[in-house]
Amino acid sequence: MKLRRLEVCILIFISLIFTYSAFISVKQDNIANGLLRLHVLANSNTSHDQQIKLLVRDAVLEFCEPILKNADDRNEVYEIMNENMQTLANIAQKTLWDLGENRSVSVSLKEEYYPTRDYTDFSLPAGGYLGLRVIIGEGEGKNWWCVVFPPMCNELAVSEKTDYLPKKYTIRFKTAEVIGEIRNYIFG
């Protein structure tokens, strides 16, 4: 009889864990569905290449801000960005050339896994997000992440525009981190 009670308790506990995990996973998906992340990878980790990365980032953000200004949701952002990918690639490449760099740059728009990222006033849980990925040269250097839509890519924007995210998401979800990592491991 004691064994039966233990088995029931274990089953209830496992059920609660799965229910909670599903709840957190849905929360992460809801957050992800409202964002466009930016992921810029430098050619290498030299200080020169890291500076180049930041200048390319600035050019990308300068281009994206006005064209996404009136977008209402991620689907509209996707359409706008998809229509402007070649222009964006040209701007990133021209930025490199203007700096005397002969490296290539590639720009893509796709779903990708992002680890948990802490910003000044909030944290985004690990998981799959629509990402604007900019790779400079070999793309083997440190990367730089932020949120292009809604615009939160600099400290001023982060501190002034956190009203885009509901306050209940400003805490870090350790469970969401773990679930995001597991989902990424299983589904790629």
Image (tube, helix red, strand yellow):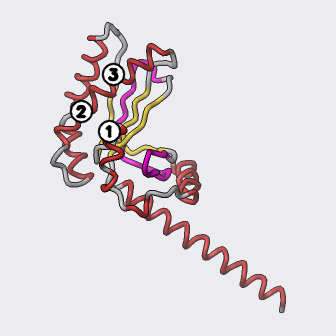
Q: Tell me where residue 29 appears, x and y as whole percent.
A: 41, 59
Q: Residue furthest top?
A: 100
For the residues bearing labels 2 and 1, Cβ distance under 8 angstroms: yes
Q: Which residue is mark 3?
A: 55
Question: Is 161 above or below relative to 81?
Answer: below
Q: Which residue is mark 2?
A: 85
Mark 2 vs 1, N-terminal side: 2
Q: Tell me where residue 68 appears, x and y as whole percent.
A: 20, 43
Q: Residue furthest right?
A: 2
- Stretch of the chain drawn in magenta: 117-139
For the residues bearing labels 1 and 3, Cβ distance under 8 angstroms: no
What secondary structure is marked by label 1?
strand
- Please tell me in which quadrant of the rendered image residue 33 appears: bottom left
Mark 2 vs 3, N-terminal side: 3
- Please tell me in which quadrant of the rendered image residue 139 appears: top left
Q: Residue 23, which numbered label?
A: none
Q: Tell me where residue 40 appears, x and y as whole percent.
A: 40, 30
Amino acid type, label 3? Leu
Instruction: Specify the quadrant that holds the N terminus.
Output: bottom right
Horizontal side of 12 relative to 97 (left or right) equals right
What secondary structure is marked by label 2?
helix
Magenta segment, prevailing SS (helix, strand or loop):
strand
Closer to the camera in the image, 91 or 66: 66
Pointer 2 local density, CA inside 10 Å: few below 14, some 14–19, many at least 20: some
Pointer 1 local density, CA inside 10 Å: few below 14, some 14–19, many at least 20: some
Q: Which residue is mark 1?
A: 109
Q: Tell me where residue 182 appears, x and y as whole percent.
A: 58, 53
- CA separation in Å, label 2 and label 3: 18 Å
- CA separation in Å, label 1 and label 3: 20 Å
